[in-house]
Image (tube, coloured by chain):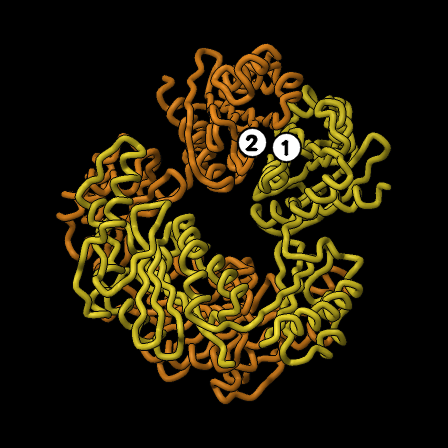
Chain colours: A orange, B yellow
Amino acid sequence: MKPISASIITIGDELLIGQTIDTNSAFIGQELNKAGIWLKRRIAVGDVREEILNALTEQSRDNDILLITGGLGPTADDITKPALRDYFSAGIRTDAGALQNVHDIFSRFGRTPSEVNVKQADVPDLCEVLPNKRGTAPGMWFDKDGVIYVSLPGVPHEMKGLITDSVLPKLKERFTLPAIVHRTALTAGKGESDLAAHIADFEAALPAWIKLAYLPSYGLVRLRLTARGDDAAAVEHAIGDRFADLKNRVAEWLVADEDISLTEALHRLLKERGKTVGTAESCTGGYLARLLTEPAGASQLFNGSIVAYANEIKERVLGVPAEILRRHGAVSEETVRAMVAGGLRVLGTDYIVATSGIMGPTGGTPEKPVGTIWIAVGSRERTETLLLNYRFDRARNMELTANTALNFLRRFIAKTS
Amino acid sequence: MKPISASIITIGDELLIGQTIDTNSAFIGQELNKAGIWLKRRIAVGDVREEILNALTEQSRDNDILLITGGLGPTADDITKPALRDYFSAGIRTDAGALQNVHDIFSRFGRTPSEVNVKQADVPDLCEVLPNKRGTAPGMWFDKDGVIYVSLPGVPHEMKGLITDSVLPKLKERFTLPAIVHRTALTAGKGESDLAAHIADFEAALPAWIKLAYLPSYGLVRLRLTARGDDAAAVEHAIGDRFADLKNRVAEWLVADEDISLTEALHRLLKERGKTVGTAESCTGGYLARLLTEPAGASQLFNGSIVAYANEIKERVLGVPAEILRRHGAVSEETVRAMVAGGLRVLGTDYIVATSGIMGPTGGTPEKPVGTIWIAVGSRERTETLLLNYRFDRARNMELTANTALNFLRRFIAKTS
């Protein structure tokens, strides 16, 4: 079976100029992949007519599907629709459903659409309109010379809704797709090179149709096995055996055997145990609390946090003794231990994770340079501490500390019977 | 002067499969743009030899510069280096400086590099090595048939260091570059379409060499003017006048007249006034604290936070009366007012911002559906409240609430004399 291949074309100067980070392509990539469509290329071009036309011509040569996002907004710098009209030599028509949708959205907010808003319902006459429940710009589906072209608005939640509701069901109808199976293991605390050396023989023994990828991210590495084939059951079975072997080999650093975040793994563990957690943060400034409340259902396991950025808050709210701060400093093992004790008392949770460190760029001293960070995790029974010495910039120190602290907490809980 | 154009080629299956979000291209785009290099295209291809070779061939046809990132790691799925050797028909040599660098990095951690680590110093013999202080994979610079090819590791901080330290200085030496000037106004509280209608005549009157772009992001819209020309002083002058006009027209929603974040604008305002802030958060779960501590220098103006996710913490730590919670519920104007009062008392700051709402996907009721969020901002003198009614998913509700709350705080402070 010939693989069905796609390219994504993202349109907008803001992507080339770096003022917007392209998160849309990642979502589309994931969804296509799960559907068994091979994403061959992602291309971003500016709001330049010829560049858009060139990209359409080039990418339609060796692809079955082109997904085009962006450049459909009501403002004058959005030029995708005229470019598509030129490309397909299409006329223009006002789509009744899309027009009704514009009016519906505005009337929901008690407003009347302006002329530019109403123009969102004008589409090239060769396209099939894909209704957009979340915004005024409709999706557009073109089927020409065996290639499917889909144009979607760039606003992430509108694009996502259209992909899920319309595009994927229609693509699955239109093409016969192979089985693609991924298995992902999330590891923490072991670098990419070290992991690679550790499982070199496993990797060397993989058949050609199973690939292993290393995906590092701030102290975490995802190991992803990907298999493809025509028979879904056979592919599932073969990758299952390999994945079991891989998990055994990295058991020491394994956080999760599916593609979830470190926080999601922590949520599951806490829910299984019926335990609660809180944070007492200095240098992470609320980031641990933010991560713990990112997934839904956080209220079952997370009570709250004391962000004690100023020493005064460490003393007054968390009850860190002034003597400890004076003698050992805010960035010390003694302080994070006292922060855990204070957090347990004030927040009343089963576990507390505490941080105090120097994230940079300023605030370092010869004895405690930027990147010196103490972490403590404790319960009513015991407390453990960890000293980090990073040499990175503020943002990276922050990300690494957050993941390391959450993983330290996870391990602490896991070994508590 | 013919514009110097570049393409970015990003290599790695993880980008196509959507397991990694491409933040590198945004950084490179920004830097090239500031240097007056026109980024024509961004392309992402997988770890497939032919795809890499095709991209190099195609993009070298109409560009002066190709920047290639990713696929240089020590693991077996990284194939950029062999592809570059094929493309340039190059031999291989071990670079003495790069080899020393591998040994230096490992010895700093008291370790010996493995065979795969040492191989990082093997490079195509036609390239000039760009030293990488932050990692083991060196940058590589090729100058062939008038086109510059630069290959960089995909790890963000290594890539950024190489761009800043080596690539930009060398490109500025190699090419004569035009002047490009951007001016960005950050606005909050007015949608993209409404802003566009409001400044339609301003936009229509812009000369062809000045472009206006709308960059919306969760309740914020950046308005960016871009001008290019050969004479830097003339370009600066012309865009300055237009930008002053633009700022006047959007004065009501203007947060900042440069490309900074809402948090950075808030930092400046607080520093100017010599005031401090703290947060008392329920539904934002520490996100406001996280945002306020993201930029350096936060300790001058941010004391700390109480994240009172559970009602028990609202009562016990923030002193919200049980009677208020019982009668009005946690998501109510009375509760956020009491949270502000508690925050001012416990954290001792000049201002407190408080949030309580239902982020979803569960927890809504007919009277208070998902997306019902109360915000309060207060000082010792007065408190103001705001009710939001969103109808989005958890992540979007969170982002919108955070920006709206921080902007509400900013306006509150700004109008306090």
Q: Secondary structure at mark 2?
A: loop
Chain of the residue under label 2: A
Q: Which mark is residue B239?
A: none
Q: Nearer the viewer, residue B173 or A215?
A: B173
The quadrant in which the N terminus of chain A is found is bottom left
Q: Could you classify mark 2 by the number of other residues whose Cα lies within 10 Å: few (under 14), some (14-19), or many (20 or more)?
A: few
Q: Nearer the viewer, residue A330 or B201?
A: A330
| Residue A320 locus on image (x, y percent) | 59, 15
Report the residue marked by disc 2.
Answer: A363
The quadrant in which the C terminus of chain A is found is top left
> Is residue A378 positioned above or below B67 on the image?
above
- Quarter of the figure with residue A302: top right
Q: Residue at x 56, y 69 (%)?
A: A131
Q: Nearer the viewer, residue A411 or A391?
A: A391
| Residue A85 locus on image (x, y percent) | 53, 84
Q: Residue at x 71, y 35 (%)?
A: B354
Report the residue marked by disc 1.
Answer: B299
Q: Is residue B29 visible?
A: yes
Q: Do callouts 2 and 1 mark residues in contact (Cβ within 8 Å)?
A: yes
Instruction: Answer left or right for B370 relative to A396.
Output: right
> Is residue B391 positioned above or below A61 on the image?
above
- Quarter of the figure with residue A242: top left
Q: Residue at x 45, y 27 (%)?
A: A270
Q: Amino acid at mark 1?
A: Ser
Q: Secondary structure at mark 1?
A: helix
Looking at the image, the residue that sits furthest to the front is B173
| Residue A21 locus on image (x, y percent) | 51, 57
Q: Could you classify mark 1 by the number of other residues whose Cα lies within 10 Å: few (under 14), some (14-19), or many (20 or more)?
A: some
Q: Amino acid at mark 2?
A: Gly
In three-dimensional space, the C-alpha distance between marks 2 and 1, rounded to whole angstroms, equals 10 Å
